[in-house]
Image (cartoon, grey):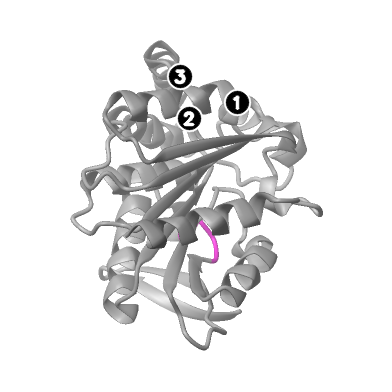
């Protein structure tokens, strides 16, 4: 793994990681990881992809700084990842695959519905479609908290619900402003892929509230209802929301690899 600094616009820089120990690349995988993940946790996954001909690229931290010490909000994160996507297509001129995890999977869905660049395949991990009433309630609650405590105050209750007890101590202290931006972004997302992009959805059966597999099934059904036929879902009965960060991630990376390979075979 090597690092490079990627510049978006005039004032935004983010550190990226590249795994490109590949003799004859057949594709590029863009990892859009979760808000509390570091790209180093994907090292084993990336090296496996390298062995099979895929260059892997991802931002080192999802919580890169935009203005002074503020975290990038949802729309800015979408902009950053979209620009990285364009850069990878231009640089490598190879099939591009998106791997979105958790918060990164929500960003990926937003990119998917508005990008003019077709991806060869999409893997969404630990995400789902949330009921409208739940998002509306969460938005109203967060708005009230932002008015009472300020947009830059930590959203402790939402952080506990989003990350669960196991990951709370390693997660960033996301603010009310961050969640307001996220909920507004979620409301704009439609389960739609303009190029009928092949999709794989994966999640663990023991995920936290925010990534509960029932929400994954709901999103899967929504894509199917909107005419996306090239979509597969796998729920791993013995996994939680750590997935690829677990010491023994079993067959999961090979399932993802097989999916990427199958899309190239079809095309």
In the rendered image, residue 7, in percent from the top left (x then y), is placed at: 34, 73
Which mark, residue 227?
none
Q: What range is drawn magenta here?
A: 60-64
In the rendered image, residue 149, in percent from the top left (x then y), is placed at: 49, 27
Residue where numbered disc 3 is placed:
138
Q: Which residue sits at x=34%, y=35%?
A: 229
Number of residues whose C-alpha sits closer than 10 Å to that of mark 2, classed few (under 14), some (14–19) or many (20 or more): many
Residue 265 shown in magenta: no
Number of residues whose C-alpha sits closer than 10 Å to that of mark 3, classed few (under 14), some (14–19) or many (20 or more): some
Compared with 48, 193 (above or below) is: above
Q: Which residue sits at x=46%, y=56%?
A: 262
Residue where numbered disc 1 is placed:
212
In the rendered image, residue 51, in percent from the top left (x then y), is placed at: 61, 76
Looking at this rendering, what residue extends furthest in the front direction? 265
84 or 148, which lies in front? Answer: 84
Decide which of tag 2 and tag 1 comes sooner along the chain: 2
The span from disc 3 to disc 1 (Cα, nearest Å) is: 16 Å
Decide which of tag 3 and tag 2 comes sooner along the chain: 2
125 or 162, which lies in front? Answer: 125
Is label 2 in a helix, a strand or a loop?
loop
Left or right position of 251 against 232 = right
- Dots 3 and 1: beta carbons under 8 Å? no
Which mark, residue 128?
2
Compared with 158, 65 (above or below) is: below
Looking at this rendering, what residue extends furthest in the left direction? 116
Is label 3 in a helix, a strand or a loop?
helix
- Dots 2 and 1: beta carbons under 8 Å? yes
Front of the two marks 3 and 2: 2
Q: Which residue sits at x=52%, y=81%?
A: 20
């Amino acid at each position: 793994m090597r690092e490079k600094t990627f510049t978006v616009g005039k004032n935004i820089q983010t550190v990226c990681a590249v795994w490109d120990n590949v003799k004859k690349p057949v594709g590029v995988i863009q990892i859009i990881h979760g808000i509390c993940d570091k790209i180093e946790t994907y090292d084993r996954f990336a090296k496996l992809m390298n062995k099979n001909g895929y260059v892997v690229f991802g931002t080192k931290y999802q919580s890169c700084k935009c203005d002074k010490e503020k975290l990038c909000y949802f729309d800015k994160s979408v902009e950053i990842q979209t620009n990285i996507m364009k850069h990878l297509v231009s640089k490598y001129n190879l099939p591009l695959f998106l791997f979105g995890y958790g918060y990164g999977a929500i960003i990926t869905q937003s990119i998917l519905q508005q990008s003019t660049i077709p991806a060869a395949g999409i893997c969404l991990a630990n995400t789902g479609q949330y009921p409208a009433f739940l998002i509306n309630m969460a938005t109203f609650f967060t708005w009230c908290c932002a008015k009472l405590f300020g947009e830059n105050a930590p959203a402790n209750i939402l952080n506990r619900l989003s990350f669960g007890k196991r990951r709370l101590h390693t997660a960033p202290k996301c603010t009310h402003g961050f969640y307001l931006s996220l909920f507004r972004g979620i409301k704009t997302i439609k389960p739609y892929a303009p190029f009928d992009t092949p999709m794989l959805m994966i999640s663990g059966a023991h995920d936290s509230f925010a990534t509960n597999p029932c929400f994954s099934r709901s999103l899967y059904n929504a894509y199917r209802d909107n005419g996306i036929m090239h979509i597969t879902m796998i729920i791993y009965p013995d996994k939680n929301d750590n997935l690829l960060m677990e010491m023994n991630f079993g067959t999961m990376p090979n399932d993802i690899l097989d999916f990427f390979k199958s899309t190239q075979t079809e095309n």
